[in-house]
Image (cartoon, grey):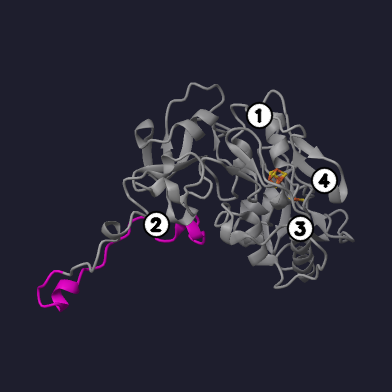
């Protein structure tokens, strides 16, 4: 007879669940879901060894276990702490946690620029969400922030180190998905930075996954940069049979009309790539950067997004058009547009396909 799986009872924010022994507090909280799950900027369940760097997932352990119900003296990182039987944990019900998390956000933002209006990650940035949900209105930091030049690391990825929060996720991707890592974290403390050191190109077939795991706008897709804001695009689930070994071929296409602006892996509610048959759904660079036509894909339907995400605005499923009443109130006359912007201006010329322009679009792209 197979051994019975040992389970532990854990109570998080007054909700009790049973989880297998060895489960971390963070993963137990994710099983409950919603606000009970602490935010995680460095932990990534599909990357071994991730977590323990950023401290955003701090929780209070009000009772260690049934056997030893003493509270833990300090807040603990929930991504690195495993549950014990009878453990009582406080996340959003703890004032200490809320205060500490606001402090962690303040530290993460010490050097991170507040350039969301021009950052490609805006709308899907975990640090932006963290700042809004747990941060404070102001900063007490008065010193110059450290800045870096933007760096092209390979043909498809741009590194903007100024935005990096040193979560290490991209280095784990390079270690665990590619055969030889050519970038990493150099130097220590205030001087630590992500780099290839000798401006070496990151050209592995799975390097694009570094963009997907980056929680901020430090690693961006050069084929999509400045082409569009994500909330103006329409994400759809799509697949193709890909010949690259280990590529799952299941993606999200980010469309504007019929144009494919961007291809990414599909993400779950925690912002991590989804799993297929128990394996993470990483995608190859051919699917991500070379298949930019809808005819390359079998489209399954509109991607289901969290209702609270800015990207979900105006993309609800089952939307019913309200009854058109203009003609009725105008005594049967058809409404007439005052002017068609495309007749008047070459800017935004609909015949120019932004997704086919290499890099950001400039005014020259619209000249006759
Ligand atoms: S570049 Fe992005 S993924 Fe890599 S360490 Fe910095 S924040 Fe993390
Ligand atoms: S998510 Fe736990 S320390 Fe970063």
Which of the two residues, 200 or 331, is positioned nearer the viewer here?
200
Q: Which residue is mark 1?
A: 177
**Residue 227 horizontal/vertical position (percent):** 48, 49
Q: Is residue 366 left or right of residue 132?
A: left
Task: Kindly check if marks 4 and 3 are in contact, taking CB atoms under 8 A apart as contact.
Answer: no
Q: Earlier in the sequence, mark 3 or mark 1?
A: 3
Crowdedness near tag 1: few (<14), some (14–19) or many (≥20) residues, C-alpha within 10 Å:
some
Q: CA–CA distance between discs 2 and 1?
A: 34 Å
Asked if marks 3 and 1 touch (Cβ < 8 Å), the reply is no
Q: Magenta residues, as a range? A: 306-334
Mark 4 lies on residue: 192
Front position in the image: 129 or 305? 129
The image shows residue 226, relative to residue 130, as above or below, that is above
Is residue 344 one of those drawn in magenta? Answer: no
The spot of residue 190 in percent (x, y) is: 85, 51
**What residue would you read off at disc 3?**
111
CA gap, disc 3 to disc 2?
Answer: 35 Å
Name the residue at 76% across, 60% down. 89
Query: For numbered disc 1, what is the local secondary structure?
Result: helix
- Measured in 3D between alpha carbons, the distance from the residue under mark 3 to the one under mark 1, in whole angstroms, is 29 Å
Residues under numbered marks 4 and 1 in contact, where contact means CB atoms less than 8 Å apart = no
Q: Any mark on residue 315, and which?
A: 2
How far apart in space, not on screen, are marks 4 and 3 (Cα)?
A: 12 Å
- The reply to whether residue 90 is visible in this rendering is no
Quarter of the image where one finds residue 352: top left
Determine whether the residue tagged by mark 4 lies in a helix, strand or loop.
loop
Q: Earlier in the sequence, mark 2 or mark 1?
A: 1
């Amino acid at each position: 007879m197979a051994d019975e799986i040992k389970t532990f009872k854990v109570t998080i924010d007054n909700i009790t669940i049973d989880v297998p022994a060895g489960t971390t507090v963070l993963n137990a909280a994710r099983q409950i879901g919603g606000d009970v799950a602490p935010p995680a900027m460095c932990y990534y369940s599909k990357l071994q060894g991730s977590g323990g760097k950023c401290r955003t997932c701090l929780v209070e352990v009000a009772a260690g276990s049934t056997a030893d119900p003493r509270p833990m003296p300090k807040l603990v990182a929930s991504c690195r702490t495993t549950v014990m039987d009878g453990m009582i944990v406080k996340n959003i019900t703890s004032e200490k946690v809320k205060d500490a998390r606001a402090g962690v956000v303040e530290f993460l933002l010490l050097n991170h620029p507040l350039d969301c209006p021009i950052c490609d990650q805006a709308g899907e940035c975990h640090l932006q969400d963290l700042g809004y949900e747990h941060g404070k209105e102001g900063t007490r930091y008065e010193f110059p922030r450290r800045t870096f030049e933007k760096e092209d690391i390979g043909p498809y990825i741009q590194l903007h180190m100024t935005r990096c929060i040193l979560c290490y996720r991209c280095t784990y991707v390079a270690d665990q998905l590619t055969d030889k890592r050519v970038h990493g974290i150099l130097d220590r403390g205030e001087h630590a930075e992500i780099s290839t050191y000798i401006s070496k190109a990151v050209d592995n077939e799975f390097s694009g996954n570094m963009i997907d795991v980056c929680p901020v706008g430090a690693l961006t897709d050069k084929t999509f940069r400045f082409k569009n804001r994500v909330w103006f695009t329409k994400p759809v689930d799509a697949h193709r049979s890909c010949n690259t070994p280990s590529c799952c071929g299941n993606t999200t296409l980010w469309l504007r009309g019929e144009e494919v602006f961007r291809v990414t892996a599909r993400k779950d509610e925690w912002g991590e790539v989804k799993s297929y048959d128990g394996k993470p759904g990483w995608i190859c660079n051919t699917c991500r950067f070379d298949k930019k036509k809808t005819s390359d894909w079998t489209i399954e339907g509109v991607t289901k997004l969290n209702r609270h995400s800015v990207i979900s605005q105006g993309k609800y499923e089952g939307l019913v058009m309200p009854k058109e009443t203009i003609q009725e109130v105008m005594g049967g006359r058809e409404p007439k547009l005052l002017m068609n912007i495309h007749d008047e201006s070459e800017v935004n010329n609909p015949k120019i396909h932004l997704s086919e322009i290499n890099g950001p679009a400039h005014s020259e792209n619209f000249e006759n």
